[in-house]
Amino acid sequence: MKPPLLIALLVALALVLAACGSDDEDAERAATGEQPATTAAPATATATSPARTTAKPAAAPKPAAPKRRRGTHRPIIGIGEQQAAMFKDTRFARLGVKHVRLVVPYDAARRRIERDLVTVWLAGARRTGSEPFITFGHSRETPSKLPSVAEYRSAVASFRQMFPEVRVFAPWNEINHNSQPTFNAPRRAAQYYNAMRAACPTCVVLAGDVLDQRGMVRYLKTYRRHLAGAPAIWGLHNYSDTNRFRSSGLRDMLATVKGEIWLTETGGLVQFGRNFPRDEQRAARATAYAIKQARDNPRVKRIYLYNWTGADRKARFDAGLVAPDGTARPAFDVLREAL
């Protein structure tokens, strides 16, 4: 055999052996799960390079929208309070509450002492950047008087002229409670709503503002028949629900009227007559329950806890978040957690 031919045969044999060795290495990687070795792409190669044109991958399916869980609704939490001192309390500022409620006599603008009290209170709300919500109620001097519609309209006009910054109103407080002259006059209470609505068509005006007591639904049905139009927002004081850890009053309200519900006055009772002896821990649990009720019902858009400053042990009613000596009560911690 000539040397050149021998050299050619040796070169061919070497190439065959090299190919067999490469196949053995790839087989071993596959058995162990290791990815086979690949040749690195040139640094200039990109997905848009003509040499690498590929089909566009299908778009990933959009994830399904998460289902709403009970308790995930977040209504606005405000505070109802009669004393302007709340606005100077640094704890109030730290909470970040921006919605506050005050109950005033319907004829407040005509009596100097009432005007002064409202002026100071509204100044505090303005200073803290809080939206004021005014609810009218009976006169302090003549609490049993049921004013005529003309008297009411005139008194409200005077109040609005004096305090034009207020844009949220409830025409009358707890219209179905026997402490109010509207107790047996649902038609007149409805006429007050109509007058308030006509006086300020751009204001937020709540209907109802009833207490969750026996006869509430019957009262509302009569009241509703005399309303001019369909109110967008209704007010409810659900103290009974909140402090008995039930929801029957709120359910009745939701079934009886359409539109938003604001729990305009509610909260845990520290003490109230014989039925609720003094108990700050029970009040804290009730406060938590009130907030839970609001969050469990998407139609409830606001809740105003009453109130900031508590009363002494001799008082018949006390629902304060803060004790008279300034000590924060357990219900205050519940509110802080909720916010």
Image (tube, rainbow, N blue to C red):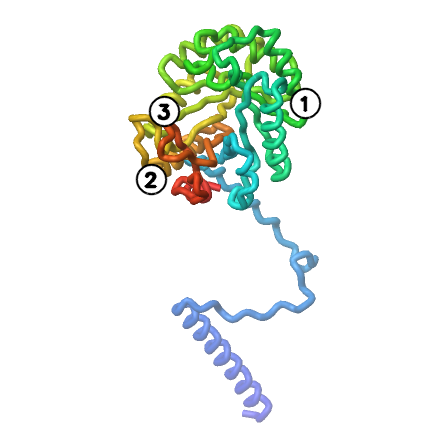
Q: Is residue 98 left or right of residue 270?
A: right
Q: Which amino acid type corresponds to the residue marked 2 in the rendered image?
A: Gln
Whole-Å distance between the Cαs marked 2 and 3?
A: 17 Å
Residue 61 visible in this rendered orientation of the protein: no
Measuring from the top left, give residue 224's x and y in whole percent.
Answer: 49, 10
**Residue beneath disc 1:** 162
Whichever of callouts 2 and 3 sits on the residue coming sooner in the sequence is 3
For residue 129, above or below residue 185: below
Quadrant position of residue 113: top right
Disc 1 versus disc 3: nearer the observer: 1
- Above or below: residue 84 compared with residue 202: below
Q: Position of residue 118 (x, y in %)?
A: 60, 27
Residue 266 or residue 24, whichever sits in front? 266
Residue at 41% of width from left, 34% of height from top? 311
The residue positioned 56% from the left and 89% from the top of the image is 7
At label 1, the amino acid type is Met
Name the foreground residue: 106 vs 171: 106
- Asked whether 230 or 86 is in front, the reply is 86
Q: Are marks 1 and 3 in contact (CB under 8 Å)?
A: no
Specify which label sits upstream in the sequence, 1 or 3. 1
Q: Which residue was labeled with disc 3? A: 240
Count of picture labels: 3
Disc 2 target residue? 281
Disc 3 marks a residue whose amino acid type is: Ser
Q: Quadrant of residue 51?
A: bottom right
